[in-house]
Structure formats: structure tokens, C-alpha cells
Image (cartoon, rainbow, N blue to C red):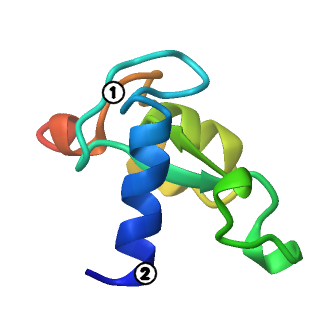
Amino acid sequence: MSNWEETRRLVLERDGYQCVSCSTKLSSTGADVHHLLPRSMGGSDELTNLVTLCDGCHAAHHPNLAGASRAGFPCGQSLAANRSR
């Protein structure tokens, strides 16, 4: 298991596999781990800088990076569950 995989698992467990923004319960594969302070701005992979988000909430935090494929997904919905739309 890589260091990131272990860090991700610890964040998901700490947050109860639940989006910290909208409280949606998530599976491991449907959860995003978000950097509160982006790495590009000096943020780290420390647990205190990471939170669990659903796809919709994660896209809302990155409106300029979300792209058309993530646009329009409400909180709690997974991209994988909506690819057939």
C-alpha cells in the first residue's frame, strides 16, 4: 500500500466515510480526499490538511478545475453513478 493510499484510508476512517460538507455517506471509491490548503500553495498531505468530500462538494471547491464532466452534479452524487446521463 502506498503512503497516499494509507493517508487516504486514515482520512476516510476519521471522517466516517462521510462528506464533511453535506454529510452524505460515501464508499471508499466514491469519496474524494480534499486538501484544505492546496499543495500548489504549500499545503501538505498531513491529516490536518485533508477532509473527505463527495464529488459534488469537491467540484464546488474547484469550480475552475471541475470541467464539464463534473458540472451539474449535486452534493452526495458520485460521478461514477451518473456517467450514463
- Residue 83 location (% of width, % of height): 18, 44
Q: Is residue 85 above or below residue 38?
A: above
Disc 2 packing (10 Å; few <14; some 14–19; many ≥20)? few
Q: Earlier in the sequence, mark 2 or mark 1?
A: 2
Please name whichever residue, 2 or 33, is drawn nearer the observer in this view of the structure.
Answer: 2
Please name whichever residue, 6 or 83, is drawn nearer the observer in this view of the structure.
Answer: 6
Q: Name the disc covering residue 3, or none.
A: 2
Left or right of 41: which side holds 9?
left
Residue sticking out furthest to the right: 41
In the rendered structure, which amino acid carries the disc numbered 2? Answer: Asn
In the rendered structure, which amino acid carries the disc numbered 1? Answer: Gln
Identify the residue shown where x is 77% and y is 66%.
38
Left or right of 33: which side holds 82?
left
Identify the residue shown where x is 52% and y is 57%.
67
- Residue 20 location (% of width, % of height): 58, 27
Residue sticking out furthest to the left: 84
- SS at circle 1: loop
Q: Name the disc covering residue 77, or none.
A: 1
